[in-house]
Amino acid sequence: MVHSTGHKNRLARSGVTTQDVAFGDEIYSKEELVAEMGAAMLCGVAGIDNNTISNSASYIHSWLRSLKEDSRLVVQAAAQAQKAADYILGEEETEGE
């Protein structure tokens, strides 16, 4: 669901709008991180159990090296994840508005 908010007519995230993004690319990995963080945020709002959130945390752990190499990545991804969660919850306008 969070991936869908990256569409060019919604929040226009480069991880969704960029052509020819391959599995494992930095831009792909960042979009996956945004999606997992956004999903975890939405789980919190919806009261979904901790097992789902724990699985997301394990998935995010796979980007630990990238997070260590770029300390801004987690902050940027969290900000984009929050925008995506807000958009899904109807609390955020589209990028074009």
Image (spheres, helix red, strand yellow):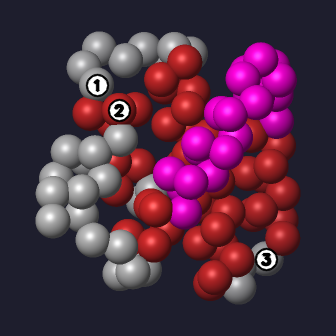
Query: Disc 1 on helix, strand or loop?
Result: loop
Left or right, residue 44 beside residue 91: right
Left or right, residue 26 beside residue 59: left
Image height of 23 relative to 97, above or below: above
Depth check: 55 or 86 in front?
86
Q: Which amino acid type corresponds to the residue marked 2 in the rendered image? A: Ser
User: Which SS does the magenta portion mostly show?
Assistant: helix
Considering only order in the chain, which callout, 2 or 3, is on the residue closer to the N terminus? 2
Residue at the disc numbered 2: 14
Tell me which residue sits at (84%, 57%) in the image. 54
Tell me which residue sits at (35%, 81%) in the image. 90
Q: Which amino acid type corresponds to the residue marked 3 in the rendered image? A: Asp
Image height of 60 relative to 51, above or below: above
Considering only order in the chain, which callout, 3 or 1, is on the residue closer to the N terminus? 1
> Percent position (x, y) of residue 10?
24, 57
How many numbered tags mark residues here?
A: 3
Residue 36 appearing in the image = no
Using the rendered view, name the quadrant where residue 5 is placed. bottom left
Residue at the disc numbered 1: 18
Which stretch did the figure color magenta? Answer: 61-82
- Residue 49's label in the rendered image is 3
Left or right, residue 16 beside residue 19: right
Depth check: 12 or 20 in front?
12
Tell me which residue sits at (35%, 41%) in the image. 13
